[in-house]
Image (cartoon, helix red, strand yellow):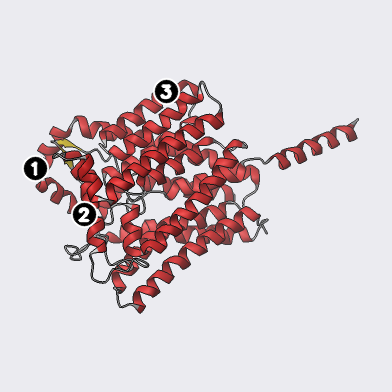
Amino acid sequence: MRVSTKSLVVFILLAYIALLSINGVVTVAAYMTTRNILLYKDFFALVVPVFVLILLYARNPRVTPQCRSVLVFFISMVLCSLIFMLLSMMTGQFDFFRSIVQFRLELLTFGSFFFAAVLMLFEYEERVEILNKIIKFYIVCAVINALFAIAESTLAGALYAVVGFDPGPQLTEFGKQYGLLLRTVQGQLRAFGLLTGPFSLSEYLFFALVLSPFVSDKNRKKYIILILVAIVFSTSKTAIIMALLYIMYLMMRRVLSLRSSLNIVTMVTLVLSLFFYVTTTNYSIYEMIFPEENTYAENSILLRTVNIEAVKNDSEYSPFIGAGYAVNGNAVVGDDNSNTVPLDSLYIYMLSSYGNVGIILLVLVSVVILSMLYSRTLNGLTASVYLYWMISLSMNFVYNNPISNYPGYIFAIIVSILLMSIRKSPQRERAQTSAKLARTSTTH
């Protein structure tokens, strides 16, 4: 039986979602056997899109301006990384192996833009069908991860008994042996679902939360509650705030217009983001706000403040290009990372590898894209796309780094671009209406 290109691509995408949704299980299997298994990430992110492109080339697809724009954006990001890698080589701040590891990590995210551009070569109706299937499957996988997260947190005592460790450093070290980030907060296990850690889970579930409009009216409330509970059990304060901001939008949308709801949530998010940025990047302000010992503030804010200062105090640090591409970070498995700074937030990541030039570029590009998404939301695009990126980028900027917390933004990018590609512009709707009227008049 002949399989259509569309059916094959849908199968590949669902397999991709399934694997990244159980990345923790796959990682454990890889650490117990061979870590080559983890190359599935590279296969789906880079090899598969090229394969699909070859299949679609035979159909002589129409390349839309949107598709070209996404492809140019993908190429620009790759070139940006290569340029800063070259600058590090010129300044003597270069480690070949570490650079390859970080570049590969970035390509896993960048590849989503390439994959999305390839998927945009399908006809409009095919894209709608592909998008509907991957969103539904992502929602199912999110529900499974949420249930596992709740089970892990409520049955933590049994888990401690199985692994033979109480909450603490020994448990964390045990997790590292299998590629997992096992952490506790005051004895409570930070749920990680079927992923590798609580940060990966919280970002994964937040994207699932903003997809709630695609859940049936009958099950939507139960779905939202389930995802919220799982996010709380991940104990990620950043993700909890992100979820509350989205819930705020849903509540305001019941009584206010779309524009007013978006404006209020955007303003609150930006104020919070500015507060987090100031308290995290300025130790004096941190001490003024938290004059007494505060465990939560020390773990979430002060730790990142110290890491920022550590990057800036590096003898090779340049305000323009940072400490050097891939100089810091602990992504190199088995390497001695004791003298490197953890790149656990987008700000620290950019400051270290790309400097203030990279940070300014990131902010400018983000503002342009978010402005475009805001405008398109007012003209028919589902609010989920704008809200997800506005909230996630703003809140994660100084606290988390989705690029290093796989799967991070991988499917959020693909789904967002496909959602934008199927939104009918007013001009297209008028053209389709005129065509229908023309057909009607000819029949009469």
Query: Disc 2 marks which residue?
Result: 306
Q: Give the quadrant of residue 22.
A: top left
Find residue 299 and report its horizontal and vertical position in percent: 20, 44
Q: Is residue 253 visible?
A: yes
Residue 165 is marked as 1
- Circles 2 and 1: CB atoms closer than 8 Å: no
The residue lying toward the viewer, choosing from 115 and 284, is 284
User: What residue appears at the point 57 percent right and 62 percent down from the top-left corner?
Assistant: 54
Query: Disc 3 marks which residue?
Result: 221
The residue lying toward the viewer, choosing from 211 and 348, is 348
User: What residue appears at the point 37 percent right and 67 percent down from the top-left corner?
Assistant: 320
Q: Nearer the viewer, mark 2 or mark 3?
A: 2
Q: Amino acid at mark 1?
A: Phe
- The disc, 2 or 3, on the residue closer to the chain's N-terminal end is 3
192 relative to 379 in the view: left or right: left
Q: Amino acid at mark 2?
A: Val
Whole-angstrom CA distance, mark 2 to mark 3, is 41 Å
Task: Tell me the element at label 2.
Answer: helix
The residue lying toward the viewer, choosing from 54 and 172, is 172
Task: Tell me the element at label 3.
Answer: helix
- The disc, 2 or 1, on the residue closer to the chain's N-terminal end is 1
